[in-house]
Image (cartoon, rainbow, N blue to C red):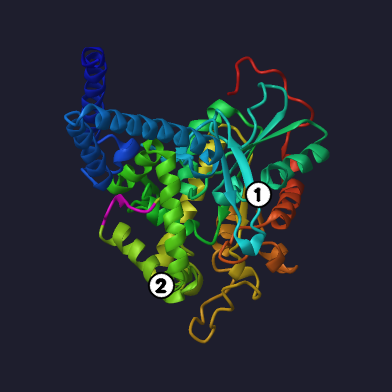
Amino acid sequence: MNQSRMPLGRVVRALLLLLGALLLAYAISDHPFYGGEPGFGRLQSLIAAVGVALAVAAALPLRFAERVLLVAVTCLVMLALAEAAAAIVLGQSIRPIYQTDERLIFKFIPDRQSVMKRLPANGGTVVGHRINTDGFRGEELLPAGSARRVVIYGDSFIHASYTPDDETFAVVLGRQLQAAAGARIEVVNAGVSSYGPDQIILKMEDELPRLRPDLVVVSVFAGNDYGDLMRNKLFRLGADGRLVANRWTLDPAVRSKLELSQRESLLLRALRQMLGSFRSRGGADGAANEAAKFSDWDFLLAEAEREYRSFIVDGNDVVTNTHVDYYSADVSLQPESPSARYKVALMRAVLQRIRDVARAQGVPLAFLFIPHPNDVTDKYDWGPVDRARFPSYDGRNQTAPLEDAARSLGVPFVNLYEPYRAVDASQLYFRGGDDHWNAAGQRMAAELMARLTAPMLPPGLPAAASAPAR
């Protein structure tokens, strides 16, 4: 009987040694799937300890060794099944949609589905959208020559991950233009959340020759796009006041975080988010204080000054913030400050470059200027600005320089400040800490933009192109 069991015993012990060696090697390899950030961390230590334990178990009596092997194999199979389930059930909500880019800092990952959940104050609705194989929100591009093509650039207001496809500014504008122009219209949603107008310059340079649109609309969110120019560090003003490309670098920790998000376990990401949710519930005061920063004038002014001094005064070209966009309080509250004046001048130069890129491609261009809700209505969550403390404040301080620049550049535009102000603008934005426009705000903006741009489109259908536009 012992002779008949010897081969089985060797197999069991060999498998335990093999599994132990594989787990130990995986822990040492520093692979990010379970290893996380570079360096030997807690989870890697745990994996290595399990590997050593399995190897030691190979020396146990056979009946114990068999049980250890069974438990180990069962756990590994269950882990694999859990990962597969996480990919199917949670993939769209926790799988990131961004990747690093040496020209744009970051960009979308093509062919990716994503969902997000609105804040409870905005209904808590779950909204899904797709990034197509060309890296734009929406369906695949139409064949060249089958429709008039309009490309819309902007940040999260255009990307609009919080809005169903049919209610986005891009789609509503397409319907409005199609009805007005009497031709089939394809609107390409080229918005990317957290982008600034500086990134839009580079995106247009890369994409317009390929897309060959009949019209380009560039959206600027006055609330934080001035600050994006400081955070992104892609351009600065030369001694002659002209736009100069800057030699920026991405902070290694930020790069590592973005790259790691693509390669780590979805199950691990889900568990981390769950633990973070529990911690935030337990520390509600801390979470509230963190959220309050976005409407704290002292914090926002200090942050605006810090960003300006870091980039312009101190010449720090390391990009450390890619996705957190603060309200440009200096431009709004202290428009005569050095930081505000520089940002306005830099924004003007950026808008000029956008015009020049469109002009070089022979494409008509229109601007859309979107005000921050706190500037266009006194009923927004932040509450009115203390005019005694900030006597230079005017709700137009952020949009008026954009309007002046567009006029001097000869670019047609829609400034939503007055149209929104003329109605109850508090009904055009989300609430509860989300300062984006809602479906009503997007619909109104699309109607105004359609009136401006419909005459700019060539009549009828275009002739078939000789090469694909994708």
Q: Which residue is mark 2?
A: 299
Q: Position of residue 12 (x, y in %)?
A: 26, 22
Classify mark 2: residues with Cα within 10 Å, few (<14), some (14-19) or many (20+): some
Q: Which residue is mark 1?
A: 163
**Magenta: main secondary structure:** loop
The tag on residue 339 is: none
Q: Earlier in the sequence, mark 2 or mark 1?
A: 1
Q: Position of residue 315 (x, y in %)?
A: 26, 55
Please state which of the two labelled residues, at mark 2 or mark 1, is closer to the viewer. 1
Q: Residue at x 57, y 49 (%)?
A: 116
Q: Position of residue 361 (x, y in %)?
A: 56, 32
Using the image, determine if residue 305 lies above or below residue 229: below
Specify the segment rendered in magenta: 315-321
Q: Nearer the viewer, residue 101 or 18?
A: 18
Identify which amino acid the numbered label 1 is placed on.
Thr
**Is 460 within the magenta?**
no
Q: Residue at x 59, y 70 (%)?
A: 374
Q: Indicate left or right for 299 with 45 as reference.
A: right
Q: Quarter of the image containing the C terminus?
A: top right
Q: Indicate left or right for 316 with 154 as reference.
A: left
Q: Indicate left or right for 330 with 446 as reference.
A: left
Do callouts 2 and 1 mark residues in contact (Cβ within 8 Å)?
no
